[in-house]
Image (cartoon, coloured by chain):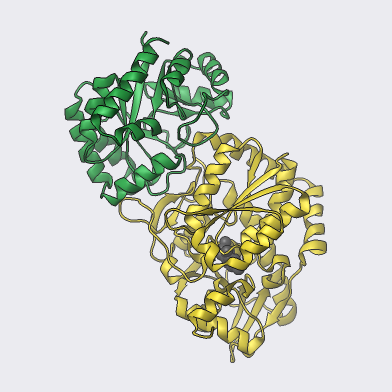
Chain colours: A green, B yellow
Amino acid sequence: MTKTLVIYLMAEPETPELARAAVDGGADVVELGFPFSDPLADGPVIRRAAERALSRGMRTRACLEVLGRTREAVPETPLVPMTYSSILEAYGWDRFAVDAHMNGATSLIIADLPAGEGPELRRVQLVAPTSTDERIRLAGEQTDGWLYLVTVAGITGARGDVSPALPGLVERARRLTDTRLYAGFGISTPDHARAVGAMADGIVVGSAALQAAENGPDALREFVGSLRSALDAA
Amino acid sequence: MTEVFGTYGGRFVPETLIPALDELEQGWRDALADDDFHRELHHLATTYAGRPTPLTLAERFAPGKRIYLKREDLLHTGAHKLNNALGQAVLARRLGKHRIVAETGAGQHGVATATVCARFGLECVVYMGEEDMRRQKPNVERMKLLGAEVRGVDFGTKTLKEATSEAIRDWITNVETTHYLIGSCVGPSPYPELVAELQSVIGREAREQVLAVEGRLPEAVVACVGGGSNAIGTFRGFVADESVRLVGVEAAGAASLGTGRTGVLHGARSSILADEDGQIADAHSISAGLDYPGVGPEHAWLRDTGRAEYRAATDEDALAAFQDLARTEGLIPALESAHALARARDLDAELIVVCLSGRGDKDLAEALAALGLS
Ligand SMILES: Cc1ncc(COP(=O)(O)O)c(C=O)c1O
């Protein structure tokens, strides 16, 4: 089975075009960040992108609208909004899920809503190297489509090397669940993509994609293309 | 779900932290059931921290009333924060953690944390907003002298909110070796309960002391509310006494309970200052320790159930009480505590206990400038 490439973009007015470019470059899934003022799981790149998006008025309704336009720009691609609990608490948990799906969302990721909390909200669950076997099993049962493996105990952001904690996490998750496993946090180069692709079923690239997207759709397409080639060679 | 206080509380944190919170909760339960833990805390409280702290009648500050001050300003390091820091340091050692991270606003919690880390030989990193480093400079110097590393946070509001976020990010990254020594009854479960329990010594002592001198319970107890730890510690001593009013005083520009809405910040659902989209709003207070858009979940619950009432004091109210207490009683209160004093003196009650949560040396530059006295 080919490996899945997930690209994270921050919801901004330009996102539909950027998503198109990412998909043209070989992205299989696009994660759409709905910015939050206090993103606990994020490092400086995504935090700054969120600050900028908020200063440009990217509140929940505007994000949903961008999601809808992104759906039109990439009709076949799974789209997954990623955000924080505060946004849903304010908008209404059920209403958010309904409106996101109406605007084309395939699933959701809530970075600060661990497995077991808010069980009625269907979403992609995350597990980390610190997760116990019991929690990996629970997340595997509750997750929606695939399981997000957080490669390190840490926050988002590019890192020099692939986390040494990842192989052990993949091995445990394989044993405890039979869902697809996509790894993210710190994956930023084609070399990382190849190395992680050899273990997991897919990769998620966030901070590095945002940095490439700063230089426009062509630069993003080229960067995503380099990840795609590396992943296909894994 | 792990909400503890009605619908408030919970664990709204990344998965990475959940096992550490489980371990902390278990370690805390074990400690509470262990007489050695209580003996060690009691020994530290009496031989190191300066407990019990006295109860002082402030006759000249509020003529016509009997306002008693619970003197947490006399505790070692000058504020109630040490009660919590000592307890959590002992707990961290029991959990085998050698590195401590903390956030600080006024710097009092940072100083208390740096102090216990020095005392126990633990590595200490304190996150502090750069705006707070400016207005609470003496505390930055104290932390450094005590051997802590102070990391300035230079984005967002540059105050307690951002310092807390950065401390949590550090904890996520170093969770195997590190204990997060949170400074108030906020954060993911079990922190709000743990901090409240460690601060409840304030209310327990105050109740005994006021009964001893007055032979009756006070009509009201009053405390300032930032994250809410000195208030919850005071309230816990009296919450079962239904005749005693529990009054919390927030800064008018940071009134998470008075003007906030239900939301999620720093790992818990509580009453917070946020806009209608759930984006956290900026708080404002002259007092760095109250300049925070959130509050502990137990306070939101006490508000909703009607057991406690919450009021606000402006910067001007606090500054006036700050100056008046200095001139009438020879006590310089922390600007945080001055908010409680301001509302206590105009409360419709006669016999009142106020938590004097800290001393005001740290605030001299800021307060004198604001009063036009520098
Ligand atoms: C003296 C003093 N009082 C009160 C507070 C507010 O914190 P809390 O509401 O947790 O007691 C602070 C916080 O820094 C403080 O230094």
Percent of width and height locating residue A175 = 54, 14
Above or below for B219 versus A215: below
Above or below for B238 versus B264: below
Percent of width and height locating residue A161 = 52, 25
Q: Is A28 situated left or right of A45 in this image? A: left
Quadrant location, the N terminus of chain A: top left
Quadrant location, the C terminus of chain A: top left
Tell me which corner region of the image, top left, top right, bottom left or bottom right, holds residue B74.
bottom right
Residue nearest the viewer, comparing B15 with A98: B15
Q: Name the quadrant where ligand 1 sits.
A: bottom right
Residue found at x 52% / y 18%: A170
Residue nearest the viewer, comparing B165 with B312: B165
Residue found at x 33% / y 32%: A212
Residue nearest the viewer, comparing B249 with B328: B328
Residue found at x 23% / y 44%: A62
Percent of width and height locating residue B62 = 58, 88
Above or below for B218 versus A4: below
Q: Which residue extends farthest top?
A: A1
Q: Is B149 situated left or right of A174 in this image? A: right
Above or below for A225 versus B170: above
